[in-house]
Amino acid sequence: MTGLRKCFKDYSDLTALLRSRGMIVDDVRAIPVLRREGYYMIINGYKDLFLDSSVMRSSDGDRFLPGTSFEDIYTLFRFDRELRSTLMDGIIRAEAALKSLCAHEFTRAYPNEVNPYLNLGHYNSAHRRSAETLINKVFKRILELDDNPRNCGEYGGKAYIRHYMNDMDRQVPLWVLANDLSFGQIVWFYQTQTAAVRLAVATAFTGMGGARRSRRLTARTLDSMFNRLVFFRNLCAHDERCYNAHFDNRMNESVAHAFQDLAYLLDSSDYRIIRERLDDLVSGLYRDLPSHAREALRQVGYGTGSL
């Protein structure tokens, strides 16, 4: 049996390790942060910008650039946290708009049918298998119409759906059901729709877009935008590093592109708030991390034409 590859270290051991690698560390300030946030989340997550690659070619382990302090890395960590928060607020608004428009346009296409989203014939035939999975694994599960043995009598799920299942003859409008769908599930629903419904939703987004009204959105453009935003929403929700993330590992699918998407999907007042928060974050990073702000923002994609 091999020994432990990573042995336990107390907080003072961790700060000593950082000092041995060339970092300036004040235990009085650093240890409470490590106790609250965790060494791995801060150091392993955000060290790359501060590593001295030339020295590391001839030495084992990490070596930090001269003058690097714990506060520097923690500043980048906090910037990224606020970046996630700002992006998430915008994505939540875009998600709400997609749910609202999908429910409206789909129901307008099938106004006289009970729960028309359960009818496979109302989906794009080219995506029949995907639509069937959506109906059986998502919609019927939410409505407790699947074969799960827990479904034995009155509906036991969300209260707002229970009202329609128990008191409204199991007629659950899509605008009610949509509230119980994840962002990924409503995007899935949109992408399995007929060309007519997809176009109607895209046209509605074009009409409500705030910052960039002049661009006509197509269904395919919405697919790209929402696939990207689902990726970044999941990343934000799980508190993962955001500033240098790229959707599908494509260098041209950066965080900046996600913010750019919001310019087309939010109304002008909502987008203005998001953009002002982002610009304030950028100004703060230049102020608090002047030696590394430009490179960090290059990885964000800020100032490269996307934003």
Image (cartoon, grey):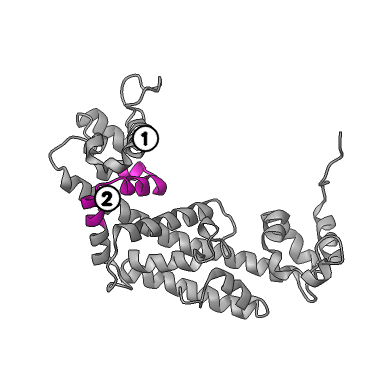
| Residue 102's disc number | 2
Depth check, front residue: 98 or 31: 98
In the figure, is residue 253 to the left or right of 57?
Answer: left
Amino acid marked by disc 2: Cys
Q: Is residue 35 above or below residue 175?
A: below
Depth check, front residue: 203 or 4: 203
Q: Position of residue 98 (x, y in %)?
A: 31, 54
In the figure, is residue 226 to the left or right of 160?
Answer: right
Amino acid marked by disc 1: Thr
Image label count: 2
Q: Nearer the viewer, mark 2 or mark 1?
A: 1
Taking the spot 32% from the left edge, 20% from the top edge, the residue there is 153
Depth check, front residue: 94 or 306: 306
Taking the spot 58% from the left edge, 55% from the top edge, the residue there is 240
Q: Position of residue 257 (x, y in %)?
A: 46, 67
Magenta stretch containing residue 184, yes or no? yes
Give the residue pinned by disc 1.
133
Q: SS for tag 1?
A: helix
| Residue 212's disc number | none
Query: Few, some or many C-alpha atoms within 10 Å of disc 2 (few <14, some 14-19, many ≥20)?
Result: many
Magenta stretch containing residue 237, yes or no? no
- The numbered mark, 2 or 1, whose residue comes first in the sequence reads 2
Q: SS for tag 2?
A: helix
Q: Which region shows up in magenta?
A: 178-201
Taking the spot 45% from the left edge, 64% from the top edge, the residue there is 258
Q: Position of residue 239 (x, y in %)?
A: 57, 54
Outermost residue toward the left in this view: 112
Quadrant location, the N terminus = top right
